[in-house]
Image (spheres, rainbow, N blue to C red):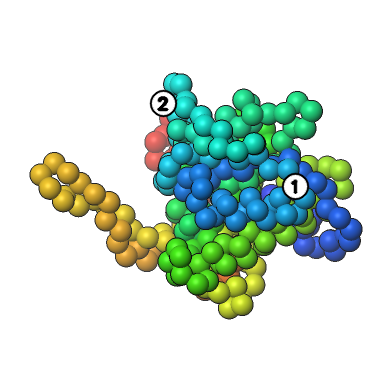
Amino acid sequence: MFRVLSLLFVCLSLACATPVPSGEPERLHILLTNDDGYGSVGIETLGEALRGAGHRVTVVAPRGNRSGSSASMTFGAIQVEEKAPGAYSADATPATCALLGLSAMADPEDPFDLLVSGTNAGANAGSATGISGTVGATTAAVGMGGIPAVAVSANEVGQEGEPGHRKHFEQTAAFAVDVIDRLTRTAAGGPLLPAGTRLNVNVPGIPWSETKGVHFGVQGMGAQFGLGFEEKAPGVYAPAFRRPSGAEDVPGSDAAALTEGFVTIVLLDADYTAPAPARKAIERRLGEF
């Protein structure tokens, strides 16, 4: 956690402590994916906002919903369909789509600068971060693709087709564009993010006018939802969402801040190592071999 915090403070020094320079942000070539599937409202509105800001956007997204895929990979041949110029759907996980785009759809004359994953319908904060296909795509992009990445997720306002539902995704996309533009303005010719890191952005399911601000924090341990399985027919089990356990969270938790109405931004890396005190305690219990 301390390593994540130190990286976070580096990012904050770039994006917050220093005034954001004026002028037009750098135009980027962005690879866009998600885990809700090609054609979902989140990826549509995010793509529109990124293009509207002047960025070149190439879309490589799963053919259908791949929520909860984490960073799992699709091995074997992959069916890919070109839906429009520079836009593809693939029978693959989000992480696979990320690597597929970074390799097979790369333009040597205009290489990718950033991977963006989202906007996911539903937050990916706290303990949900690790199982999220939205975040999993950024894991692959940073760890295996060598490119910075941003994951964007939002709890929904209303149901699809209702007034305010799409607007919430459009406003979330506008915020994501602002985050990216701030990174490009403050990079000063250097990397958009510290090496090996990605941003995880989450938006609460309330009107933007009611949000309490932006919370820069750490990945929480609290669960946004509980999940189990129930037998629906002999030998057939289906997911059953439950009330989360309510276990105590860590200071600065994104999950806690999201519940309080804050937009949250967490800088993640790929280090799963536990904090030093916990490691030492296990080493003492296991003893010498």
Which residue lies at the image location 57% right of the left edge and 52% below the top edge? 44
Query: In the image, what residue type sits under mark 2?
Result: Phe
Residue 86 on image: x %, y %: 65, 36
Q: Which mark is residue 55?
A: 1
Q: Is residue 210 left or right of residue 22?
A: left
Q: Which of pointers 1 and 2 lies earlier in the amino acid sequence?
A: 1
State the residue in front, 256 or 102: 102
Q: Which residue is mark 2?
A: 289
- Residue 263, can we see it? yes
Residue 131 on image: x %, y %: 44, 46
State the residue in front, 286 or 237: 237
Q: Where is 66 relative to 170, above or below?
A: above
On-image quarter of the C terminus: top left
Res 177 → quadrant: bottom right
Residue 203 on image: x %, y %: 56, 64
Q: Residue furthest top?
A: 76
Q: Residue furthest bottom?
A: 210
Residue 257 on image: x %, y %: 54, 68
Mark 2: few/some/many CA within 10 Å (<14, 14-19, 20+) = few
Query: In the image, what residue type sits under mark 1?
Result: His
Mark 1: few/some/many CA within 10 Å (<14, 14-19, 20+) = some
Q: Mark 1 to mark 2: distance in Å?
A: 55 Å
Which residue lies at the image location 50% right of the left edge and 51% below the top edge? 40
